Amino acid sequence: MQVYKVLIYKDMPISRAIDPQGDLTHILQSENISSRLSRFFTIAKKWKQKCRLGISAALADVPQPYVCLAGRSMEPMVIEQEESRRDFLILATSAVGAAGVAGAAWPFIRSWSPTADVLAQATTEVGLKSIEEGQMITVPWQGKPVFILHRTPAQVKSAQADDKATMTEPMPDAERTIKPEWLVVVALCSHLGCVPQPVGTGDYGGFLCPCHGSHYDTSGRIRKGPAPRNLAVPHYEFKDPQTIVIGKAVA
Amino acid sequence: MFKSMMEWVDARLPVSDLIKSQATEYPTPKNLNYWWNFGSLALFVLIIQLATGLFLAMHYKPDAAKAFDSVEHIMRDVNWGWLLRYLHANGATFFFVMVYTHILRGMYYGSHRKPREILWWFGVIIFFVLMATAFMGYVLPWGQMSYWGASVITNLLSAVPVAGEELVVWVWGGFSVGDPTLNRFFVLHFLLPFVVLGLVVVHLWALHAVHSNNPDGIDLEHKDTIPFHPFFTIKDLYGVGVFLIVFCIFVFYAPNFFLEPDNYIEANPMQTPAHIVPEWYFLPFYAILRSIDFLGPYSKFAGVIAMGGAIAILFLLPFLDRSPARSFRYRPVSRVLFWIFVVNSFILGWVGYNPADATVFGGMPIVYVGRAGTAVYFGYFLLLWFITVTGMEKPQPLPKSL
Ligand code: HEM
Ligand code: FES
């Protein structure tokens, strides 16, 4: 036995294309709904599959569902409920699916973050004894170059004198050093990460970034060019007067 | 024998139908000029890249300690390794020659206009993925330019507000470009060309759904078309021949013409080369990035937005152009704007090639030229919209058919 489902709506317009004989139009013009239903059912049974296709196709241009006639039971039910139930099920399933995918993506995304061994190389110890006044060395820390400059009194003075000058990121020299004669900065330009050239190359007696022409002064502060920030001062401590440890150990 | 075999196959998978409808008998405008060769040429170069890349990957080592040496090993020890690498490195250059020409062709003849918007968008997406692929490929030899180019470009991400710094560390897998970066770039460089291949299939699907535009930019009747085979199979093959001559001249006689000598020095994170230049095909965009240097702390982010916008604006092109005529052949004002745009792109490229603090014309900072060029670049799109939306440009009468 073929089970089919038909739907009828109040004021359902049935186009001629799917109803060439005009039977349905005729039914839908009759007065009360129950007579529509019973007459409809008689024809629907006759049409079987064909009828089901025809009626469903008509759903598209009907905004207001009225009753639904399921199978042969003739039991009318309100289709709005059916629709919102289905909407809810689709929504709930999609939400669970999306949450699942997002959750599953997390380990993949996190796998790109620095690994435990990379994090473990967090500190670098540097002896300062051999660095003469006016001399500068570059040491690697976390794969990044760090400038350690033993500043001359003149360099210290010019850095401190400029504390009041207008600059992109104002910061007094005293906040950028632990001992004024030692300048320790990460030698990566805050513009796009090039290594600036050694002290004395830029205007203001400091460092010139060759990539796009940023000038840093003897305190590593940005004074001219596209870079938005000063050269970063890494976390460092004097282990003893002759040794510094750059970086913080990470668990 | 062959015929009955094909019948057997066709009954199960209609291959002959597909070939007939989409290739041999596919109706193609009879007035296509040589600018229409560049699509098939781009596909040809993609195949070269896939083939050479696959075999390079069999000898290459994606490890910061070994990568540079493994490329030298490919050059010196691997049989024909030098050829594979030179084909691949120059192939990247010619890929961009093809794609840029292909895009400009579309801009001139209005190939992005209705109903070809989706076709055009897939093209722009391919262009975007291609740039990412080439960028990551260039990192692989782990020379000084590889390293510092990667540093400069990945640092652009730090301009993203709020999460920028974390984002860069995440992309690097460390606190600077390093071994984890190289390793993931290798995997992505391997993967993305296959993504491009998939996108090309959709691009062609969209093309075959709406059919080719033509130099007159008019909708054609069936009588104005000819079958793809033999007319365009032979024309595309001819194009491949001409390309191969030019390509081989570079591969065999000037293989390092487009490569930077600094990239034959192994990457050194402690020292930046005096002058970092990206590959030529990124230069105009690099110039746009650097031209925004007058916004203080916002310069960096604004520069990144301008550079991204320079490509993203291509997505809007189908809606910016409102002229009743597609092809610039019938649009005198648009034509002039177009050639200004092309010349301007070369000027931007030249600005991008020069050091940022260079001066030109007796003392003028080159960045002024860069700013003007950036204005002209975006101005083109704005003016094109303006003259067509206001009807200022009166197109010449279009032919009804060919
Ligand atoms: C969209 C297509 C492709 C483009 C535009 C492209 C671009 C590039 C570029 C610019 C380089 C640097 C060349 C150099 O300076 O030495 C490179 C290197 C490399 N590519 Fe590709 N590539 C593509 C496809 C592929 C594919 C499909 C593979 C592997 C399946 C691959 C594997 C490699 C390898 C192993 C290297 C390092 C060896 C070398 O530097 O020559 N590439 N690629
Ligand atoms: S990276 Fe230093 S100025 Fe751009």
Image (tube, coloured by chain):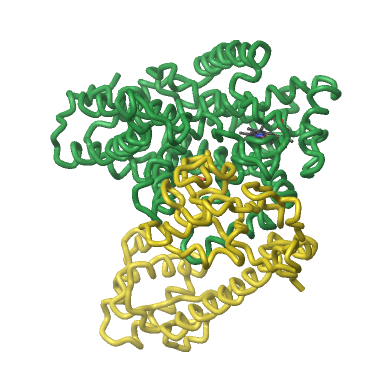
The quadrant of the rendering that contains the N terminus of chain B is top right
Q: Colour of chain A?
A: yellow
Q: Relative to A78, does residue B149 appear above or below in the rendering?
A: above
Front one among B213 and B93: B93
Q: Considering depth in this image, is B337 or B196 the residue closer to the camera?
A: B337
- The residue at 49%/49% (across/down) is A216
Residue lying at the far front of the rendered structure? A153
Residue A132 x %, y %: 69, 49
Total marks shown come to 0
Residue B162 versus residue B270: which sits nearer the camera? B270
Q: Is residue A61 above or below residue B354?
A: below
Residue B165 in the image: x percent, y percent? 56, 61
For the C terminus of chain B, give its image quadrant: top left
Q: Give coordinates of residue B86: x percent, y percent.
A: 69, 22
Q: Residue at x 14, y 41 (%)?
A: B390
Q: Residue at x 71, y 50 (%)?
A: A131
Left or right, B162 with respect to B218, comes to right
Against A35, residue B64 (above or below) is above
In the displayed structure image, the side of residue B34 where residue B48 appears, left or right: right
Residue B159 seen in render: no
Position of residue A131 relative to residue B231, above or below, is below
Quadrant position of residue B288:
top left
Q: Which chain is green?
A: B
Q: Quadrant of residue B381?
A: top left
Residue A31: x and y in percent read 26, 84
- Residue B39, visible in the rendered structure: yes
